[in-house]
Amino acid sequence: MADHGQYITLGVGEEVFAIPVAHVQEILDLRPIARLPHAPASLLGLTDVRGQSVAVVDLRSMLGLPPVPASQGTRILVLELTLAGRPLRLGLVVDRVFEVTALDEDRSEPAPEIGRPWRSDCIRGIGRRSGGFVIVLDIARLIGTEAPAALAVAEAPMAA
């Protein structure tokens, strides 16, 4: 991993992931999300964040995991990213958020090789924290697969 700064650690299912804190604007409790017709499965819809509409995507769906009902721990991370040279602000639904932390710098590793191609481009590396693995996501690449829909929604004017 190139960056050993601060990370937000979060849980999806039984796994622990991390996103560089520099991408996270705020962490919100789950709030109403307006569904959009014909949206891809991972695009849940729009929510209001301080008077602005923000597209909301589901990390579970993006990782190919089955949906689960929201819980008291479900959160929306409001992210600011640059995709294809354009700024993008969107919400990312996660099962739970743990903490802001540094990872053990001397124990980080690249994504594992398995002897055949697999989609590891969305993994910046494998870190360790308190003896366990933490998968550090390249969130811009992961979301980049959903970017056309998310960008279109994020740029659409809101009707009054």
Image (cartoon, rainbow, N blue to C red):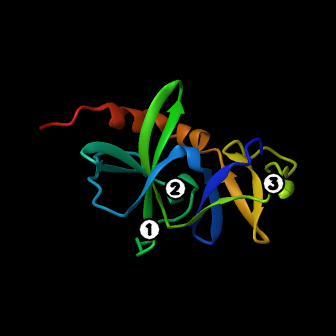
Rounded to the nearest whole Å, what is the CA distance between mark 2 and mark 3?
A: 26 Å
Q: Nearer the viewer, mark 1 or mark 2?
A: 1
Query: Residue at point 47% right, 26% down?
Result: 86
Q: Residue 158 location, x and y as percent?
A: 21, 36
The residue identified by callout 1 is 74
Judged from the image, the secondary structure of the residue bearing numbered disc 3 is: helix
Q: Nearer the viewer, mark 2 or mark 3?
A: 3
Q: CA distance from mark 1 to mark 2?
A: 11 Å
Q: Amino acid at mark 3?
A: Glu
Residue designated by label 2: 59
Q: Nearer the viewer, mark 3 or mark 1?
A: 3
Q: Is residue 86 left or right of residue 17?
A: left
Image quadrant assignment for residue 150: top left
Label 2, residues with CA under 10 Å away: few <14, some 14-19, many ≥20 = many
Give whichever of 138, 64 is nearer the camera: 138
**Upstream in the sequence, badge 3 or badge 1?**
1
Q: Residue type at mark 2?
A: Leu
Picture mark count? 3
Above or below, 54 against 59 in this view is above
The residue where tag 3 is placed is: 105
Q: CA distance from mark 3 to mark 1?
A: 29 Å
Front residue of 81/154: it is 81
In this rendering, position of residue 89 left or right of residue 100 = left
Q: Earlier in the sequence, mark 1 or mark 2?
A: 2
Q: Dot 1 lies on which element?
A: loop
Three-letter code for the amino acid on which mark 1 is drawn: Thr
Q: SS for tag 2?
A: helix
Position of the C terminus, as image quadrant, is top left
Picture residue at 35% right of the left edge, 36% below the top: 154
Marks 2 & 3, CB-CB < 8 Å contact: no
In percent of width and height, residue 153 lies at 34, 37
Residue 76 is left or right of residue 62, and the answer is left
